Amino acid sequence: MDDLRDWIRERWGLAAISLIAGLLGLWWWQGRPLAQPPGILTPLDPLQTEPEAPVSWTYRDHRITPLARFELRARVLGTERYHFDRASQLSPVDFALGWGPMSDSRILKAFTIQQRDRWYFWSSGNMPISAAEVISHSANMHMIPSNASVARRLLSVKSGQILELRGQLIQADGKDGWHWVSSLSRTDTGDGSCEVVWVESARATDHPDGM
């Protein structure tokens, strides 16, 4: 009987290890960056225009003030979810996005892209384009979904996909005095240079011509 119990425990242990390995493999497979062909996939700069009606509204105990209409079609260079920082009350995910030369796989293979603490970092041992071009053709953007459907879409986006979104660049002011203000420039750097985007619609595809 003891031998039988030992055999059962061994079998269950092996099954559990196999299940965990399979789940880890699936997680890695689903989270791996999507490969794209060489060439500029999203040639146009983001489009920023005056807000249609500069009227504030309330969202999750924050006053949201529109600063500009905003839309883009860009390659996703990285995604990072946030759960515990102050900004996560509004924004569950940041995207590092690239357009123009920063959507070209031939250029991107020379770069290492990282995200942490609401920042986007890039580095290259052999710069294929100038730092000014990197700065003006990529950005870290804080995503605030306007509804649950948009939130689901944003949280399903993968690195390497082509993302199309429309919404507004905004300022958010909390009742506790906290505030978050979007950049209105694609060429600034450092603190305050990220876009804070109120996302009204979003769609991602694996294929550059899939939209």
Image (cartoon, rainbow, N blue to C red):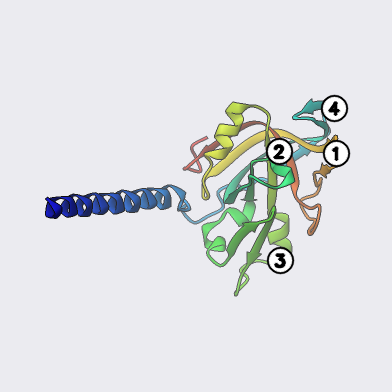
Residues at marks 3 and 2 touching, judged by CB atoms closer than 8 Å: no
Q: Residues within 10 Å of mark 4 (few under 14, many from 20)?
A: some
The amino acid type of the residue labelled 3 equals Ala
- Residue 147 in the image, given as x and y percentages of width and height: 65, 27
Q: Residues within 10 Å of mark 1 (few under 14, many from 20)?
A: few
Task: Say which residue label 4 marks.
Answer: 56
- Of the two numbered discs 4 and 2 on the same chain, state the one appearing first in sequence: 4
Q: Residues within 10 Å of mark 3 (few under 14, many from 20)?
A: few
Task: Say which residue label 1 marks.
Answer: 176
Q: Which numbered mark, 4 or 3, is in the foreground of this view?
A: 4
Q: Which numbered mark, 1 or 4, is in the foreground of this view?
A: 1
Residues at marks 1 and 2 touching, judged by CB atoms closer than 8 Å: no
Residues at marks 1 and 4 touching, judged by CB atoms closer than 8 Å: no
Task: Say which residue label 3 marks.
Answer: 131
Separation of marks 1 and 3 at Cα, in angstroms:
38 Å
The amino acid type of the residue labelled 4 equals Ser
- Of the two numbered discs 3 and 2 on the same chain, state the one appearing first in sequence: 2
- Of the two numbered discs 1 and 4 on the same chain, state the one appearing first in sequence: 4
Q: Nearer the viewer, residue 16 or 156?
A: 16
- Of the two numbered discs 1 and 3 on the same chain, state the one appearing first in sequence: 3
Residue 90 picture quarter? top right
Side of 151 where 140 appears, left or right: right
Identify the residue at image location x=71%, y=38%: 89
Identify the residue at image location x=39%, y=52%: 24
Residues at marks 4 and 2 touching, judged by CB atoms closer than 8 Å: no
Task: Say which residue label 2 marks.
Answer: 89
- Residue 54 in the image, given as x and y percentages of width and height: 86, 28
The amino acid type of the residue labelled 2 equals Gln
Side of 142 where 39 appears, left or right: left
In what element is the residue under mark 1? loop
Side of 65 where 32 appears, left or right: left
Separation of marks 1 and 4 at Cα, in angstroms:
17 Å
